[in-house]
Image (spheres, helix red, strand yellow):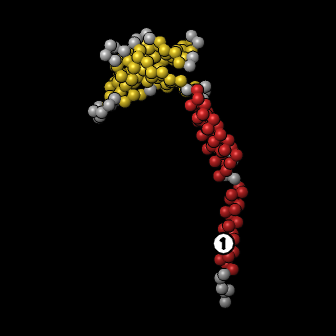
Amino acid sequence: GMHLAHLGVAVFIIGVALVKGYQAERDVRMFESDVVHVAGYTFTFNGVSSARGANFTADRGDFTLSKDGKELQHLYPEKRKYFSSNSMPMTEAAIRHSITGDVYVSLGVPSSDGGWVVRVYSKPFVTWIWFGCIIMSVGGLLAMLDRRYRRRREKKAADAAKSNNAGAAPAV
């Protein structure tokens, strides 16, 4: 169990190092139909529309994500303004999760000429971080269930009971 948990720590550390080493990001100003390329992915900006949620209004961006000319999916990041708060708007990034890594897109602020500041990320190897955590958890669970540790506890309890009985006065 402990070996497995330590292997999980190693996978986690490798994942963090690879994400930091191979991530790519760009901040760009985009207009409708503009395209930006990041780490082999193509983001096409299809525009912004208004949306309404239960407790917010939002500007919702529409991006087409493609790779090697094949459309993968549409991403919808939002810039939300909550009714209960008069503070700054909140940015909700759109994320595409995959086994090879995650791709993010988020809306920044609108520019005065009708464009939007957009941030796009590619973070490969993010799943290594999650797999490392899962492996650590399984290793910890296996170590916790190891019978050797229960035997030590049972032996300590038996030894304590013997020492308590040895010091007791004999019954008359």
Residue 59 relative to residue 131: left or right: left
Q: Which residue occupies the extreme front position in the image?
A: 21
In the image, residue 66 lies at what x, y percent?
A: 54, 15
Q: Which residue occupies the extreme left position in the image?
A: 86
Q: Nearer the viewer, residue 52 or 33?
A: 33
Q: Which residue occupies the extreme bottom position in the image?
A: 172
In the image, residue 34 lies at what x, y percent?
A: 44, 11
Residue 12 relative to residue 148: left or right: left
SS state under label 1: helix
Residue 119 relative to residue 159: left or right: left
Count of labels shown? 1
| Amino acid tagged 1 | Ala
**Quarter residue 118 falls in:** top left
Q: Residue at x 30, y 33 (%)?
A: 87
Q: Is residue 109 visible?
A: yes
In the image, residue 16 lies at what x, y percent?
A: 58, 35
Q: Nearer the viewer, residue 39 or 93?
A: 39
Q: Nearer the viewer, residue 85 or 110?
A: 110
In the image, residue 158 lies at what x, y percent?
A: 69, 69
**Quarter residue 168 falls in:** bottom right
Residue indicated by mark 1? 160
Q: Is residue 56 visible?
A: no
Q: Residue at x 63, y 42 (%)?
A: 9
Q: Is residue 136 above or below residue 16?
A: below
Q: Residue at x 42, y 28 (%)?
A: 92
